[in-house]
Image (cartoon, grey):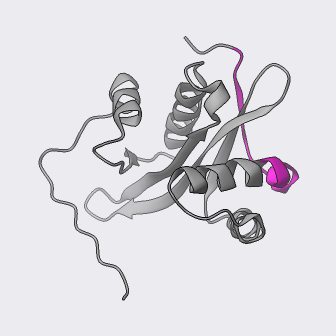
Amino acid sequence: MIMNSKTHKATLNDLDELNHLFDAYRVFYKQGTDKEQSRAFLQERLEKQESVIFISRNDSSTATGFTQLYPLFSSTRMKRVWLLNDLFVKQEYRGQGFSKALIERAKKLCRETNAVGMMLETDKSNSIGNRLYSKTGWTLDKKHNFYHWEVD
């Protein structure tokens, strides 16, 4: 059950609160804190409409978490696919349904944009995330290999 949760699409008006969440997300994933760079990154994504970001709030309108999705396309299905790249809820708000609310809002975006669905990647050791995704209707892809290439 999702309790006390409101989600909305982020705008530049949300940038300060979003930046705090995003910086905490990056620190959670072992990146150094850099609020100036993270703010610039988020501002550019919002201004150029290169991603869609949703923020969750509790009844007191406190920002509790966010998710960021990037548009991709499936050539074989000739439709949009969304990459759910980031999902984060502040530790003190975990287990209260905010993650589920953010995922449900992302699913609504897929329907609104006539997308075929979403994809995401998470570490095998992310037991909390892996349980969450299973509980919210995601299917673990066991048919495909995913490869990564990075610039030296």
Determine if the magenta segment contains residue 11.
Answer: yes
The residue positioned 50% from the left and 59% from the top of the image is 71
Above or below, 14 relative to 70 = above
In front here: 45 or 86?
A: 86
The image quadrant that residue 135 belongs to is: top left
Above or below, 98 relative to 26 = above
Horizontal and vertical percent for residue 62?
A: 81, 31
In front here: 119 or 63?
A: 63
Using residue 15 as the reference point, say whether residue 112 is left or right of it.
Answer: left
Determine if the magenta segment contains residue 21.
Answer: no
Farthest-out residue, left: 143
The residue positioned 62% from the left and 32% from the top of the image is 91
Q: Quadrant of the N terminus?
A: top right
In front here: 13 or 39?
A: 39
The image quadrant that residue 76 belongs to is: bottom left
Horizontal and vertical percent for residue 104?
A: 53, 29
In front here: 19 or 68?
A: 19
Using residue 119 as the reference point, say whether residue 102 is left or right of it.
Answer: right
- Find the magenta span and give its range: 4-17
The image quadrant that residue 93 belongs to is: top right
The residue positioned 54% from the left and 39% from the top of the image is 106
The residue positioned 81% from the left and 54% from the top of the image is 15
Q: Quadrant of the C terminus?
A: bottom left
Farthest-out residue, bottom: 152
Horizontal and vertical percent for residue 75?
A: 30, 65
**Total tally of numbered discs in the picture:** 0
